[in-house]
Image (tube, rainbow, N blue to C red):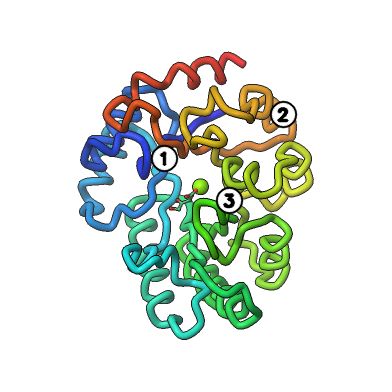
Amino acid sequence: MRYAANLGFLFTDLALPDAVRAAAQAGFDAVECHFPYETPVADLRAALDETGLRMLALNTWPGDRDAGEFGLCALPGRQDDARREIARAVDYAAAAGMDAVHVMAGRTDGGEAADACFCANLRFACDLAAARNLRILIEPINTRDVPGYHLSGTDHAERVLDAVQHDALGLMFDCYHMQIMQGDLARTLRRLMPRIGHVQIAAVPDRGEPDAGEVNYSWLMRELAEMGYGGHVGAEYRPRAGAGSTAAGLSWLSAFRDG
Ligand SMILES: O=C(O)[C@H](O)C(=O)CO
Ligand SMILES: [Mg+2]
């Protein structure tokens, strides 16, 4: 299995280009990020070119997090803001040579208006992304960490994928969120494999290094390979000893690879 360092949580004591270099030094096969927008894309490209790593994906802008926003794309009445941020994310991802954009839904009342808004913005995003040879990802996020998040389970994600019906649209299956919300990870991954665009892991319940907690990821990664998943697995966890100690907590990487 190939592993990507999620630089939204790993090596965050470093500027993004240097975090890319640290991830390469640590032996990751790729990187992914959350919100790179303050980093000039030329600086990021230079680090990616220098290390030979690909940056797999970024997130659309979450909005005003101090005001409780965590995504704009399912918020009725915010279509202009959402589509501006989708366009910005697609432009940045294309310029950085990425594969995908994770379109963040946001906190809503969960009603039909929010879902219609989300699907319309996803169609906009998929058309924009497909023209740049990018994919769009949607990710169910657990409502214990993010109360009210519009997309929090795979049944709803499947309804959205069915409603949007676009080849560019895929499911980002974050095992941390899905273990909290619904469990049954292996069977759900196997059933949804044709629709999976990316997989992420972190320990449950503390979201730390994945070689601890209630999920046996060493076993699950072997199952994922057997299912035929050919993508990277995103290590999207918070190092227990702090971001400055990311490298010290990477014993799981070689252990998982050695199977
Ligand atoms: O938090 C997550 O798991 C998502 O992948 C994300 O990046 C939202 O910031
Ligand atoms: Mg995630």
Amino acid of disc 2: Glu
Q: Is residue 141 above or below residue 249?
A: below
Q: Are marks 1 and 2 in contact (CB under 8 Å)?
A: no
Q: Secondary structure at mark 1?
A: strand
- The residue to which callout 3 is attached is 172
Q: Position of residue 182 (x, y in %)?
A: 70, 47
In the displayed structure, 195 sits above or below 223; it is: below
The amino acid at mark 3 is Met
Which of 70/196 is in front? Answer: 70
Precedes in sequence: disc 1 or disc 2? 1
Q: CA distance from mark 3 to mark 1?
A: 14 Å
Of the 4 image quadrants, the one containing the N terminus is: top right
- Side (left or right) of 140 relative to 70: right
Q: Quadrant of the C terminus?
A: top right
Residue extending furthest toward the bottom: 77
Q: Within 10 angstroms of label 3, few (less than 14), some, or many (20 or more) residues?
A: many
Mark 3 beta carbon near ligand 2 (under 8 Å): yes
Q: Nearer the viewer, residue 230 or 116?
A: 116
Marked residue nearer the N-terminal end (2 or 3): 3
Position above or below: 235 against 84: above
- Residue 16 relative to residue 174: left or right: left
Q: Is residue 33 visible?
A: yes
Secondary element under disc 2, as helix, strand or loop, is helix
Which residue in the structure is indicated by mark 2? 223
- Indicate the position of residue 3 as horizontal and vertical percent values: 50, 31
